Amino acid sequence: MKILKGVAALATVLIITPFLPRFLPGILPKILPDAHAEDEVAPNRKPVKVVADARIAVGNQGMLPLYVSADWSKPLPGIVRAILVLHGRLRNADVYYRSALTAQAAAGEAGKSTIMIVPQFLAGLDVEAYHLPADTLHWSLEGWEGGDAAEGQQAPSSFDALDAILARLADRHLFPDLTQVVVAGHSGGGQVVQRYAIATRGEAALKADNIAIRYVVANPSSYAYFSAERPEPQVAASCPGYNNWKYGMQARPPYLASASAAELEQRYVARDVIYLLGTRDTNPNHPALDKSCMAEAQGAYRYARGHAYAAAMAARDGGTPHHRLWDVADVGHDADKMLTSPCGLAALFDVPGCAAMR
């Protein structure tokens, strides 16, 4: 009898095994609903699973999808903080929105007076797959990470899109009590935030109304350097274009063309920037790690690249008195764990408890 049961069990395994790949994609999102490392491993050359349900106009150039945790079409007295969380290369804003809401809940009282915003930078294949309106903004698969212009006749930069969100937040009719805006991103989103912190024009409207702004850069694959020096000079020496944007200051896109590199650096150094680095984000072969020679000139893996960049910036004239680097202990390339860690909550909500602050 035991032998028969064993044979039956083996037969069951053999029968269902070929069908597991078909069912697992539908099961796993329910088991792993947050922005875990698994999300970053999947290819980005396929349509997103969900398109965000809200829209914001970027001038008269098109509409940007996004998630917003409150109805910001009417005044929101009592909201004192706004947090933007930018998705990674998979453009999976729905996953990052869930992680943002998880962080908001974990922040306790500070989260109750906060509005959470997650924009979505779609690609052309997403627009085609969902038959979206012609005015839906979309970019190349990774061009949005560096502020490239959108595809199509109407071509605002992804940075223009972020400017439009900041302009909405600067409207005192809608946000009479707002005191701080935080722009945060993990992985590909961290790349956007680091470059936007260099390039931003949108913060001017906030500062004019005494609204502070902070940039939180979490586990990006690369950074924009202001000099031609790199942590791995031998890699840079054999890498044409290693100092081009988004890795350096050469060949910058139109959004950044009006200012010199020195002016951009001066503005960046003056801004409130927090680098969040997972101490276990150390895999040089991570599937989502930028392995181009431009990125590898900055170090072997994300944790090393982040520390090298912060050290290089601190060593430049005047240092970086407004920049901080906080290690997130025992966390790898996992957005959900980064944002909900004590240091993540401190960076986003000023909640005490981050040991790296001491």
Image (cartoon, rainbow, N blue to C red):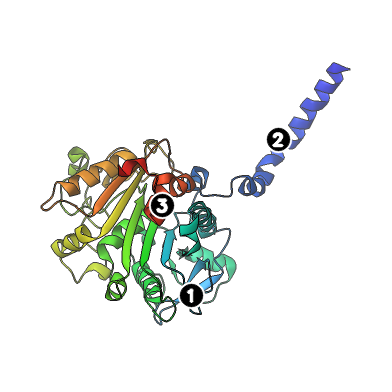
Q: Assign a secondary structure to mark 2.
A: helix
Label 3 to label 2: alpha-carbon separation: 47 Å
Label 3 to label 1: alpha-carbon separation: 22 Å
> Label 3: which residue?
351
Which is nearer the N-term, disc 3 or disc 1?
Answer: 1
Q: Assign a secondary structure to mark 1.
A: loop
Q: Nearer the viewer, residue 327 or 38?
A: 327
* Residue type at numbered disc 1: Leu
Residue 243 position in % (x across, y down)? 20, 52
Q: Assign a secondary structure to mark 3.
A: loop
Closer to the observer: label 3 or label 2? 3
**Pointers 2 and 1 in contact (CB under 8 A)?**
no
> Residue shown at 55%/72% (left/top)?
132
> Label 2: which residue?
17
Which is nearer the N-term, disc 2 or disc 1?
Answer: 2
Residue 34 position in % (x across, y down)? 54, 49
Which is nearer the N-term, disc 3 or disc 2?
Answer: 2
* Residue type at numbered disc 2: Thr
* 230 horizontally vs 110: left or right: left
> Residue shown at 39%/71% (left/top)?
178
> Label 1: which residue?
76
Q: Nearer the viewer, residue 131 or 284?
A: 284
